């Protein structure tokens, strides 16, 4: 049953007593782009009540806690979420709420969501674990993951909790760093270590603690190491150019022969550009550049052992790889019997984030494994689809996914956006076909005993207080934003 009546000032709009209720889990780009499409592309006779659930007190996911502080233009995507809240928080058309500092799976169980929402979008990203490296000594002190390092310089509350704060690497006592992996995250980390904190970082929203330690940094050399060749580099041309153009650091020439071996004539446009960039900057270091920090790219090396002495990492031993000579296996490498050691007191593993499941998937029959939720076009598959034959492919009705947890931890924000629109389009299709979870009319999760027992729930207006505070304090310091990093402090300011 749906009773329809006219809405104040909106001649054509109607308000339904049984709006389509959607829960979006996670407020990173995957979550807010899905919501944006749903709210803006739903047919005018459909009213949506959408609740964003976010485990942190703050919205925006990796835009706030992943994207490097010197890439403010990338963070413009946050406006999508801000506009959703401005347009629909108290609108007649739809209703949207931000419910922050609430972790789905722990504070609110999946079963409870199922009892309250017609559709649930899992867009919780892949930021709580790292890919592992199966190499002797990986657990030694002095070996950290890029994820931890990124969280630290971006002021993620996990690193700044009162009970057990993250201990950053002693950048004020070490000279040589190895970064394993050469994707864009590795390059962000390298820029962090190489650029001048005052000139390059101060004006950004980098955490103040990180900036202070970087000012005391004694780092001299950064090696960025990859197991395959130049053409297989995971970084984008834009990111490598940024690193080349740093005033405070100097690129040390590549190992001889690497560039020369590439047959440039056969390359596509992006690869040609990559090679020409490397050629441009692959120049000997001049006398006046000698005092600068050095960095380089190393290729065809796989770590085999982290060598520790006196309780710290001293060297990383690599096996040299060589390309497999088979046109059917382009980019493949195989180990040789030659080894090389790089001196380092810090190793940063930048080999990928890892998706993890939420408590309760097994119980309600959602199929998760291998880094992501199994899905077709964002429609989540059920456990019985395991093994995937035509006969057993079953959707978990009403459950959807977007962003990194939909596809595995990869992809820039533009890709995440397009892909989230696809998920949203399929939700709208199912809405039209009546293919969604049926819930009791008029029920609101906020009235449930579980919800009432939660403390310190952060709503959008609370977050705006913190947002304003951070911008105001940042202004005093000549920064775009002064990030509050401790969760208790955040909550105090929000409230
Ligand atoms: C270090 C780094 C730098 C990057 N830099 C760039 C860049 O410069 N340009 C670019 O285009 N792309 C960049 N990316 C990629 C970009 O960040 C991703 O494409 C995008 O953030 C993925 O969005 P998402 O919503 O899937 O995940 P996320 O952004 O991770 O959002 C997931 C959200 O879910 C929340 N959450 C998690 N678990 C729960 C739970 N149980 N309950 C409630 N909420 C939960 C998290 O707190 C988070 O807010 C970068 C990625 C990384 C890791």
Image (cartoon, grey):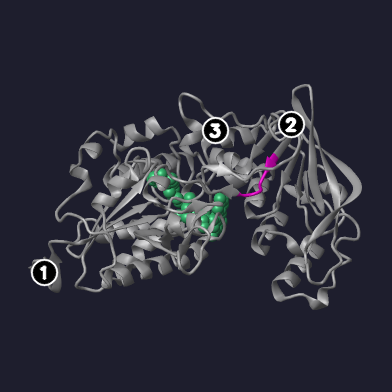
Q: Write down the residue under mark 1.
A: 9
The answer as to whether callout 3 falls within 8 Å of ligand 1 is no
Is the residue marked by circle 2 packed among few (<14), some (14-19), or many (20+) residues within 10 Å?
some
What main secondary structure does the magenta stretch of the protein show? loop
* In front of the other: 11 or 245: 11
Q: Write down the residue under mark 3.
A: 209
Q: Is residue 110 in sight in this rendering?
A: yes
Q: Is residue 43 left or right of residue 231?
A: left
* In front of the other: 409 or 390: 390
Residue 479 vertical placement versus 31 (above, below)? above
Disc on res. 213 = none
Q: Is residue 171 left or right of residue 57?
A: right
Q: Residue at x 51, y 42 (%)?
A: 128
Q: Is residue 488 left or right of residue 320?
A: left
Range covered by the magenta-colored residues:
348-352
* In front of the other: 79 or 144: 144
């Amino acid at each position: 049953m749906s009773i329809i009546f006219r809405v104040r000032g909106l001649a054509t709009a109607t308000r339904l007593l049984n709006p389509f209720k959607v829960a979006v889990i996670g407020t990173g780009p995957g979550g807010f782009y899905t919501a944006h499409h749903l709210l803006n592309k739903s047919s005018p006779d459909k009213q949506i009540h959408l609740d964003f659930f976010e485990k942190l007190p703050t919205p925006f996911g990796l835009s706030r806690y992943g994207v490097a502080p010197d890439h403010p233009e990338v963070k413009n995507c946050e406006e999508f979420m801000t506009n959703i809240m401005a347009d629909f928080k108290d609108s007649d058309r739809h209703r949207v709420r931000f419910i922050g500092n609430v972790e789905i799976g722990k504070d609110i169980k999946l079963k409870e969501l199922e009892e309250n929402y017609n559709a649930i979008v899992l867009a919780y990203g892949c930021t709580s674990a790292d890919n592992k490296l199966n190499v002797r000594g990986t657990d030694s002190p002095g070996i950290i993951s890029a994820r931890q390092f990124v969280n630290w310089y971006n002021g993620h509350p996990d690193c700044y909790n009162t009970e057990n704060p993250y201990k950053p690497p002693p950048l004020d006592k070490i000279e040589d760093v190895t970064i394993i992996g050469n994707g864009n995250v590795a390059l962000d980390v390298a820029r962090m270590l190489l650029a001048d904190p005052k000139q390059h970082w101060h004006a950004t929203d980098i955490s103040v603690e990180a900036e202070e330690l970087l000012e005391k940094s004694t780092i001299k050399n950064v090696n960025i190491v990859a197991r395959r060749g130049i053409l297989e580099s995971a970084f984008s041309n834009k990111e490598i150019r940024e690193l080349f153009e740093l005033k405070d650091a100097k690129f040390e020439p590549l190992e001889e022969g690497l560039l020369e071996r590439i047959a440039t004539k056969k390359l596509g446009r992006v690869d040609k550009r990559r090679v020409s960039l490397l050629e441009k900057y692959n120049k000997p270091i001049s006398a006046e550049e000698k005092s600068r920090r050095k960095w380089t790219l190393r290729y065809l090396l796989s770590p085999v052992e982290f060598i520790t002495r006196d309780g710290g990492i001293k060297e990383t031993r690599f096996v040299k790889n060589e390309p497999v000579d088979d046109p059917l296996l382009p980019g493949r490498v195989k180990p040789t019997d030659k080894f090389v050691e790089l001196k380092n007191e810090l190793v940063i593993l930048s080999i990928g984030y890892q998706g993890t499941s939420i408590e309760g998937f097994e119980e309600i029959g959602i199929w998760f494994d291998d880094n992501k939720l199994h899905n077709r076009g964002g429609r989540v598959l059920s456990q019985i689809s395991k093994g995937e034959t035509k006969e057993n492919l079953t959707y978990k009705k009403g459950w959807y996914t977007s962003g990194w947890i939909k596809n595995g931890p990869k992809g820039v924000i533009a890709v995440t956006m397009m892909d989230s629109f696809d998920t949203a389009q399929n939700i709208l299709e199912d809405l039209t076909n009546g293919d969604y979870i049926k819930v009791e009319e008029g029920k609101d999760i906020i009235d449930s005993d579980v919800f009432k027992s939660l403390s310190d729930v952060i709503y959008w207006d609370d977050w705006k207080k913190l947002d304003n505070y951070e911008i105001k304090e940042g202004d005093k310091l000549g920064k775009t934003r002064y990030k509050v990093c401790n969760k208790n402090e955040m909550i105090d300011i929000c409230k």
